[in-house]
C-alpha cells in the first residue's frame, strides 16, 4: 500500500506542482540533465501535436484545453500556434497526413518538462468536448444538460464542465463551474428529496412552496410509483411545472421509449402539452435517436460525457535547428511556418514579447456578412465582419453551431478556402465546416 500523505487532503496536483514539472514523466527531467551536460539543451526545436486517429472512428474532433496550455507556458521562451478552442478538425488531411492542432517552437529546455501536462490538458478536454458535440448534434436542438461531474474526481469538475460547454451543451450543474464559466448552474431534483419528504406528493408540494421562484420546476417522477402516476401528481402539485424527469432504473425500464410515449400521452390528454419530458440515466449516442422519436424534450447526460474517450494526441519533434528531424512514422516539415499557415494554426504566444492571446471559437452565420477589413493572426490574413466583430456576441461555443440553428463553425474566421495541408499537399478544405458529416 502507498504510504499516507501529509499535508494533502485530496490527491490532486496544485498549479505550482504542475508548473514545477512534478507531474511530468521523470525521463524528461533526466533527458534535460543529459542535454545540459552535452551542451544541447538550448537547441531550437519545433514540435507538433497530432493524432493518428480519433476514437471509435469519429470523423471529426473538437479541440479543447488550449487555455490551460497557454497558462502553463506563459513566460517561457516559446512560440505557440494552435487552432482556437472549439475548432472542429479531422485527424488527417485527405492524403492521410496527420493534421497538427498545436505547434511549439523554441529552445527545448524551455518546455521539455511540460510535454506530459500539455498532452494531458488537451487529450482529455478534447475528448469530452468532442463527445459533447456529438451528443449535441444527435439531440437535434433539444436541451442537453451535463450530469457528468459525479462520475469523476471532484478536482476535475471544472475541466469537465468547461469542456462540455465548449462542446455545445446547454447547462452545467455545479456552483464552481457556474462561477468560472459565467453561466448559471442548472438542476432538477434528486430522489433524496422525495425520500426524505416521505413521498412524491409531499416533495412536489414542498418544491412548489419553497423553491426560489426564479428556478424552473422540473419534477423527478420515478421514485416510488409508475412514471405516469408521479407525472400526474407533479402537474397537480406544481401549477407552473416546466417538465418532468424520468431517471427510471435499468431494472425497471423495459421499453423505455414506450414509457415515455405513455407519459406524453397522459400529460397531453389532461391538457398539459406544455410540460416537457426530460430523461437521464445511461443516456448516450446509441439511445438518443429512439428517445427523441418517443417525444423527449431534453436529456441529462452523465457517464458517457465524463468518461468520454480521450483523444490520443502525441507531441513529436519535427525540426531541430531548422532541419527536418521527425522520427519514423511521423512527418517533418522543411518549412514549418508555411506548414502552420496551411494547417490554419494561429499564433497564440510569441517568443518575442510573450503576449498571450486565447482566442475563442470563431463562429459565423451560415449566411456570412460582407467583409470590409483584413486582419492578421500570426502571418496569415483573414476576413473580419464589417462591424469589426468575429460574429454574433452570443457565439461562445459549439452549441450555437449544431442542430438546426443555422450556424457553422470555423477554426479561424475566414471567407476563403484554405488548405489543411502539409509539404505542398494540394487537397482543398473549406475553412468553415458544417457539423453534419
Image (tube, rainbow, N blue to C red):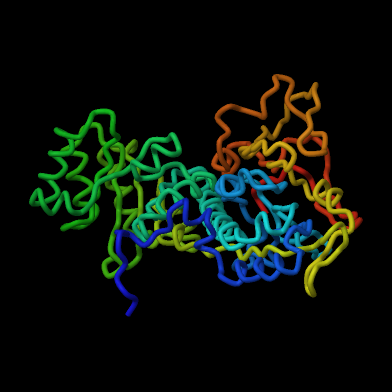
Front-lying residue, 342 or 103: 103
Q: Position of residue 327 (x, y in %)?
A: 79, 72
Residue 329, by quadrant, is bottom right
Q: Residue at x 28, y 60 (%)?
A: 248
Query: Where's the N terminus, which quadrant?
Result: bottom left
Front-lying residue, 32 or 434: 32
Residue 120, by quadrant, is bottom right
Query: Where's the C terminus, which quadrant?
Result: bottom right
Front-lying residue, 348 or 198: 348
Residue 311, by quadrant, is bottom right
Q: Position of residue 245 (x, y in %)?
A: 30, 49
Q: Is residue 152 in sight in this rendering?
A: no
Q: How many marks?
A: 0
Q: Position of residue 403 (x, y in %)?
A: 57, 44
The vertical placement of 279 against 219, above or below, is below
Q: Residue at x 10, y 44 (%)?
A: 202
- Residue occupying the far bottom of the picture: 1
Q: Is residue 96 in sight in this rendering?
A: yes
181 left or right, relative to 9:
right
154 left or right, relative to 161:
left
Q: Position of residue 344 (x, y in %)?
A: 77, 46
The vertical placement of 139 against 182, above or below, is below
- Residue occupying the far top of the picture: 387
Q: Residue at x 42, y 48 (%)?
A: 158
The vertical placement of 322 against 430, above or below, is below
146 left or right, relative to 323:
left
Amino acid at each position: 500500500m502507498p504510504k499516507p500523505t501529509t499535508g494533502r487532503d485530496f490527491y490532486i496536483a496544485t498549479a505550482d506542482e504542475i508548473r514545477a514539472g512534478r507531474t511530468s514523466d521523470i525521463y524528461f527531467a533526466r533527458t534535460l540533465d543529459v542535454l545540459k551536460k552535452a551542451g544541447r539543451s538550448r537547441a531550437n526545436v519545433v514540435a507538433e501535436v497530432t493524432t493518428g486517429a480519433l476514437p471509435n472512428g469519429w470523423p471529426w474532433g473538437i479541440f479543447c484545453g488550449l487555455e490551460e496550455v497557454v497558462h502553463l507556458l506563459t513566460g517561457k521562451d516559446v512560440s505557440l500556434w494552435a487552432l482556437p478552442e472549439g475548432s472542429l478538425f479531422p485527424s488527417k488531411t485527405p492524403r492521410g497526413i496527420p493534421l497538427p492542432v498545436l505547434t511549439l517552437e523554441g529552445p527545448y529546455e524551455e518546455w521539455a518538462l511540460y510535454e506530459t501536462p500539455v498532452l494531458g490538458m488537451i487529450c482529455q478536454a478534447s475528448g469530452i468536448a468532442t463527445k459533447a458535440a456529438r451528443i449535441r448534434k444527435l439531440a437535434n436542438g433539444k436541451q442537453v444538460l451535463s450530469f457528468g461531474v459525479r462520475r469523476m474526481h471532484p478536482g476535475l469538475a471544472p475541466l469537465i464542465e468547461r469542456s462540455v460547454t465548449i462542446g455545445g451543451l446547454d447547462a452545467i450543474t455545479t456552483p464552481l463551474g457556474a462561477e468560472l464559466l459565467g453561466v448559471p448552474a442548472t438542476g432538477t431534483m434528486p430522489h433524496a428529496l422525495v425520500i426524505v419528504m416521505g413521498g412524491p406528493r409531499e416533495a412536489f408540494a414542498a418544491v412548489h412552496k419553497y423553491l426560489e421562484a426564479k428556478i424552473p420546476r422540473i419534477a423527478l417522477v420515478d421514485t416510488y410509483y409508475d412514471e405516469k402516476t408521479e407525472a400526474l401528481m407533479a402537474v397537480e402539485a406544481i401549477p407552473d411545472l416546466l417538465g418532468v424527469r424520468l431517471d427510471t432504473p435499468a431494472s425497471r425500464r423495459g421499453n423505455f421509449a414506450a414509457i415515455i410515449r405513455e407519459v406524453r400521452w397522459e400529460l397531453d390528454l389532461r391538457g398539459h402539452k406544455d410540460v416537457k419530458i426530460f430523461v437521464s440515466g445511461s443516456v448516450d449516442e446509441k439511445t438518443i435517436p429512439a428517445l427523441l422519436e418517443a417525444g423527449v424534450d431534453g436529456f441529462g447526460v452523465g457517464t458517457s460525457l465524463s468518461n468520454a474517450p480521450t483523444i490520443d494526441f502525441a507531441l513529436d519533434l519535427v525540426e531541430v535547428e531548422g532541419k527536418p528531424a521527425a522520427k519514423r512514422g511521423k512527418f517533418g516539415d522543411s518549412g514549418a511556418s508555411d506548414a502552420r499557415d496551411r494547417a490554419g494554426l494561429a499564433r497564440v504566444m510569441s517568443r518575442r514579447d510573450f503576449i498571450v492571446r486565447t482566442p475563442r471559437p470563431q463562429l459565423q452565420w451560415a449566411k456570412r456578412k460582407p467583409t470590409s477589413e483584413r486582419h492578421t493572426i500570426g502571418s496569415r490574413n483573414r476576413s473580419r465582419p464589417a462591424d469589426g466583430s468575429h460574429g454574433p456576441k452570443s457565439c461562445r461555443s459549439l452549441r450555437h453551431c449544431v442542430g438546426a440553428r443555422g450556424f457553422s463553425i470555423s477554426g479561424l474566421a475566414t471567407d476563403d478556402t484554405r488548405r489543411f495541408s502539409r509539404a505542398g499537399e494540394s487537397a482543398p478544405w473549406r475553412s468553415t465546416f458544417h457539423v453534419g458529416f
